[in-house]
Image (tube, rainbow, N blue to C red):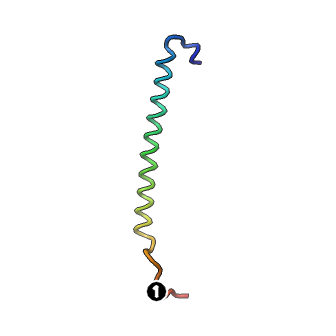
Amino acid sequence: MAQELGAAAPVFLNEISEAFLSGLAASCIVVACVAIGGSLFALRFLPARATANPTA
Protein backbone atom coordinates (compact mmCIF):
# COMPACT_ATOMS: atom_id res chain seq x y z
CA MET A 1 0.00 0.00 0.00
CA ALA A 2 2.86 2.39 0.76
CA GLN A 3 4.13 1.96 -2.80
CA GLU A 4 0.79 3.20 -4.16
CA LEU A 5 1.00 6.42 -2.13
CA GLY A 6 4.05 7.69 -3.94
CA ALA A 7 5.50 10.85 -2.39
CA ALA A 8 3.07 10.71 0.55
CA ALA A 9 4.37 7.31 1.68
CA PRO A 10 7.02 8.59 4.15
CA VAL A 11 4.49 10.83 5.89
CA PHE A 12 1.95 8.00 6.02
CA LEU A 13 4.48 5.52 7.41
CA ASN A 14 5.60 8.06 10.00
CA GLU A 15 1.99 8.54 11.15
CA ILE A 16 1.53 4.77 11.42
CA SER A 17 4.72 4.47 13.47
CA GLU A 18 3.67 7.31 15.78
CA ALA A 19 0.24 5.75 16.31
CA PHE A 20 1.78 2.37 17.16
CA LEU A 21 4.26 3.86 19.62
CA SER A 22 1.55 5.98 21.24
CA GLY A 23 -0.60 2.89 21.80
CA LEU A 24 2.40 0.99 23.12
CA ALA A 25 3.18 3.74 25.61
CA ALA A 26 -0.43 3.85 26.81
CA SER A 27 -0.56 0.09 27.26
CA CYS A 28 2.71 0.14 29.22
CA ILE A 29 1.22 2.71 31.60
CA VAL A 30 -1.88 0.55 32.08
CA VAL A 31 0.23 -2.56 32.74
CA ALA A 32 2.37 -0.66 35.24
CA CYS A 33 -0.75 0.47 37.11
CA VAL A 34 -2.10 -3.09 37.21
CA ALA A 35 1.25 -4.37 38.52
CA ILE A 36 1.36 -1.71 41.23
CA GLY A 37 -2.24 -2.46 42.19
CA GLY A 38 -1.48 -6.17 42.41
CA SER A 39 1.55 -5.60 44.58
CA LEU A 40 -0.42 -3.32 46.92
CA PHE A 41 -3.18 -5.96 47.13
CA ALA A 42 -0.60 -8.64 47.99
CA LEU A 43 1.06 -6.37 50.52
CA ARG A 44 -2.24 -5.70 52.26
CA PHE A 45 -3.94 -9.10 52.19
CA LEU A 46 -1.19 -11.73 52.13
CA PRO A 47 0.46 -12.67 55.43
CA ALA A 48 4.02 -11.51 55.98
CA ARG A 49 5.09 -14.80 57.57
CA ALA A 50 3.62 -18.07 58.74
CA THR A 51 2.07 -18.22 62.17
CA ALA A 52 4.07 -19.91 64.95
CA ASN A 53 1.32 -22.41 65.87
CA PRO A 54 -0.80 -23.16 62.82
CA THR A 55 -4.14 -24.78 63.57
CA ALA A 56 -4.63 -28.14 61.93
Picture layout, residue 1 above or below residue 32: above
Picture layout, residue 50 above or below residue 33: below
Q: Look at 46% across and 83% down and name the residue there.
A: 51
Picture layout, residue 22 above or below residue 27: above
Viewport quadrant of the C terminus: bottom right
Q: Which residue is mark 1?
A: 52
Q: Look at 46% across and 30% down and name the residue there.
A: 19
**Label 1 environment density (alpha carbons within 10 Å; few <14, some 14–19, many ≥20):** few
Picture layout, residue 40 above or below residue 23: below
Local SS, label 1: loop
Residue 21 in percent (x, y) is at 46, 34
State how many labels appear: 1
Viewport quadrant of the N terminus: top right
Residue 32 in percent (x, y) is at 43, 50
Left or right of 8? Residue 3 is right
Residue 53 in percent (x, y) is at 48, 88
Q: Look at 45% across and 71% down and name the residue there.
A: 46
Residue 25 in percent (x, y) is at 43, 39
Q: Disc 1 marks which amino acid?
A: Ala
Q: Residue furthest top?
A: 7
